[in-house]
């Protein structure tokens, strides 16, 4: 039985800015059933120039207060210990799928007008389960986004029987419009975790164009350059043939065809510019509204944790 004094103490726990920040990171990844190691808590922090030792000290304090839990170096909230085994399995699976995704990404780079290929989604965070797809974030040449996208989608439909498991390019932008509009915790983490497969120079340009993400992830350790093959010679002839008015007309045609289809198929969801975007410079197809769902769940779980422990996090 909890005494009156213990109850009062529990209701008057004062949390530092760092403690609140740690809790926000753990709650965010709890949405994905993903416990964190101490170094992951560190580079997901929104506090700049943060020392790992300080993160360790404050995290241990939260464990001692019973606000978070720790098992074998894994930290989590809401006593979701079963997520540890799932994460370990998912991390092992990711090692296998990352090799496949890298080969597929290099193949995508061979398509006309593709300028940058990055792995996104759960695999970019080192996790893969039976329900996961291999997602790709792709940057194209200006005014050829829809031509490039259509060629990739046709390949998927014809040769992969429209399977998304290993080939899911669902977000395209062009080199003249690298800045992402949505500036929030979800987008900041998705951008930060991207794995560049093709055009490391463009990857750095993309990060510079989205410096706002440092408000959420100032300590994140970005990817280092790996050896990549030069695919420009494979694209030289088709790009030359489609560089003029023919390419422009095809690009506009494919954009309008796709837009008409999306409007018919997703009437209620199409008006939400966060989930489905169709313009000359961006193609985003997330009809299930995943970003909104994640942010809604994040806020709900923060509130639940605050009520559970009588603390203030936001």
Image: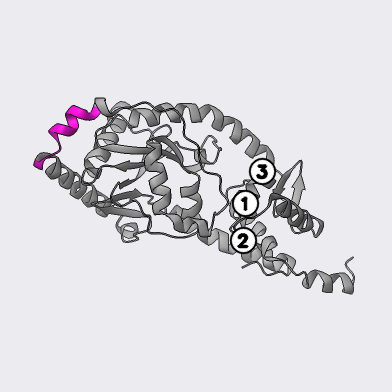
Q: Which residue is mark 3?
A: 83
9 shown above or below 203 = below
**Label 2 – label 1 distance at C-alpha:** 9 Å
**Residue 102, image quadrant:** top left
Q: Considering only order in the chain, which callout, 2 or 3, is on the residue closer to the N terminus?
A: 3
The image position of residue 76, as x and y in percent, is 69, 50
Q: Which residue is mark 1?
A: 30
| Dominant secondary-structure state across the stretch colored magenta | helix
Crowd around label 1: few <14 · some 14–19 · many ≥20 (10 Å): many
Crowd around label 2: few <14 · some 14–19 · many ≥20 (10 Å): some
Q: Which residue does the image show at 52% across and 61% down from the upper left? A: 296
Q: Give residue 301's mark.
A: 2
**Label 1 – label 3 distance at C-alpha:** 9 Å
Residue nearer the viewer, 261 or 71: 71
How many callouts does the rendering have? 3
Q: Are marks 2 and 1 in contact (CB under 8 Å)?
A: yes
Q: Is 217 left, or right, of 4 in this rendering?
A: left
Q: Is 273 left, or right, of 289 in this rendering?
A: left
Q: Are marks 3 and 2 in contact (CB under 8 Å)?
A: no
Q: Magenta part of the protein: which range?
A: 235-245
Under circle 1, the secondary element is helix
Residue 238 in the magenta stretch? The answer is yes
């Amino acid at each position: 039985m909890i005494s009156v004094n213990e109850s009062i103490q529990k209701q008057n726990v004062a949390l530092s800015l760092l403690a609140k920040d740690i809790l926000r990171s753990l709650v965010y990844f709890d949405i994905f059933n993903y416990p964190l190691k101490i170094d992951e808590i560190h580079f997901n922090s929104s506090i700049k120039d943060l020392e790992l030792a300080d993160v360790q000290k404050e995290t241990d304090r939260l464990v001692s207060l019973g606000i978070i839990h720790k098992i074998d170096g894994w930290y989590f909230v809401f006593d979701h210990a079963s997520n540890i085994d799932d994460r370990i399995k998912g991390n092992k699976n990711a090692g296998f799928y990352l090799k496949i995704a890298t080969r597929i990404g290099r193949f995508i780079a061979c398509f006309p007008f593709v300028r940058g290929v990055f792995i996104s989604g759960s695999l970019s965070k080192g996790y893969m389960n039976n329900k996961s797809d291999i997602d790709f974030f792709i940057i194209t040449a200006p005014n050829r986004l829809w031509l490039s996208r259509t060629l990739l989608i046709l390949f998927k439909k014809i040769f992969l029987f429209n399977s998304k498991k290993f080939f899911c390019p669902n977000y395209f932008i062009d080199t003249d419009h690298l800045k992402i509009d949505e500036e929030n915790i979800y987008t900041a983490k998705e951008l930060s975790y991207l794995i560049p497969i093709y055009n490391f120079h463009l990857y750095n340009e993309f990060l510079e164009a989205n410096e706002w993400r440092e408000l959420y992830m100032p300590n994140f350790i970005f990817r280092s350059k790996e050896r990549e093959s030069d695919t420009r010679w494979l694209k030289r002839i088709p790009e030359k043939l489609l560089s003029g008015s023919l390419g422009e007309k095809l690009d506009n045609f494919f954009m309008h065809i796709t837009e008409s289809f999306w409007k018919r198929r997703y009437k209620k969801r199409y008006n939400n510019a966060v989930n489905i975007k169709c313009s000359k410079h961006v193609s985003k197809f997330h009809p299930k509204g995943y970003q909104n769902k994640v942010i809604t769940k994040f806020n709900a779980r923060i509130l639940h944790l605050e009520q559970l422990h009588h603390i203030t996090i936001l």
